[in-house]
Every structure is written in structure tokens, then in C-alpha cells.
Amino acid sequence: MSDLDTSGLQGVTLKVYLYAVKKNGAVGPREVMRSANLSSPSVAYRHLQKLETMGLLTKDEWGNYIVKEKVAIRGYVWVGRILVPNPMLYSIIFLGILITELVVLAIHFSVETQEFKTFFLLLTLITVAALILFAVEGLRMLAKIRIRQAD
């Protein structure tokens, strides 16, 4: 992954770039228009040109665009060809912590004091709250970059 200037990589341009990465091949303005739900091929063409100017895409001899390289995008991490928001990863970590807490609570429930049970219940509630907050934020970030599946 490269550290190119990705400040212009947001909104529709980001969606066009993500489609090109998911497609993993040559993409043209018409298919980008359909996948990113744009109004016309010229709008898609403009965003493809912008990505070419940024150095993220190259144009082949038939006028199609190919991803030159994947770049790091702030707030997201690449998992294969899928862009996952950081909060989604945090929510998965908190899910693992929650499962561990519930297993420990189930094992120790019958032998521990009421104070331990109360403390552990509060700890579990805090973990659930963190899990929900990160999951909701991650889903909101996913909705912003949602595109149609690559054919």
C-alpha cells in the first residue's frame, strides 16, 4: 500500500475507487455509473479521470481504467479487497471480550460472592455498551461507502 495524497478521495470519488478495487479488473464509465448509482457516464468518467490524476488508476488502450495500487484510507482498513471501517474491527474485539466475560461469569457464578457478581455484571454492561456504540458507528461508515456488488 502506498502513502499517496488521498485527501481528494471521498464521497463519490471514493465509491468509484472502491468499485474499481472490488472489480479487480478494467472498469469503464458505464459500469461505474451503474454501480455507484451516478446520473450519467460523463459523471463517472470525470471521477475516473480524477482518480487517474491522483495516480490511483491507469487508463488502458481501450479507454478502461485499472487500479494501479490500493492506498490506505483514513478510518478504514483493507481486508483483502474489502474496505472495513475501524469501528467494526473494534466491535469485533469487544464481542470477543464480551464472550470471554460471559464464560467467566458462567463458570464462577455459583461460587462467587454477590459483590463479585455485581461488579462483573457492571463490567459486562460497559462492554455491551462499547460493542453497540462501535457497531453502530461502523455500520454508519459502511453505509457511506456502500456500492453495488462488482459483477
Image: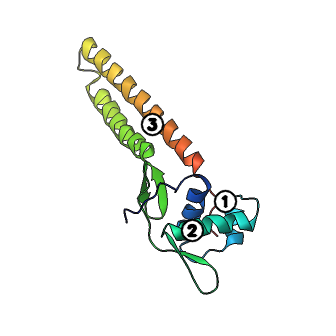
Q: In this view, does 125 lie above or below 134?
A: above
Q: What residue type is labelled 2?
A: Ala
What residue appears at the point 26 percent right and 12 percent down from the top-left corner? 115
Between 68 and 25, which is closer to the camera in this rendering? 68
- Colour scheme: rainbow
Left or right: residue 138 versus residue 89 is right
The crowd level at tag 3 (other Cα within 10 Å; few <14, some 14-19, many 20+) is many
Q: Nearer the viewer, mark 1 or mark 3?
A: 1
* Residue 105 vs residue 33, the one in the foreground: 33
Q: Mark 2 points at which residue?
A: 20
**Which corner quadrant holds the C terminus?**
bottom right
Residue 72 position (above or below residue 125): below
Q: Is mark 3 on a helix, strand or loop?
A: helix
Q: Position of residue 98 (x, y in %)?
A: 36, 34
Q: Residues within 10 Å of mark 2 (few under 14, many from 20)?
A: many
- Distance (Cα) linking label 1 and label 2: 11 Å
Q: Quadrant of residue 1?
A: bottom left
- Residue placed under numbered mark 3 in the picture: 134
Number of numbered discs visible in the structure rendering:
3
Residue 36 is labelled as 1
Q: Residue 122: image x %, image y %?
A: 34, 19
Q: Position of residue 83 (x, y in %)?
A: 48, 56
Amino acid type of the residue tagged 1 in the rendering: Ala
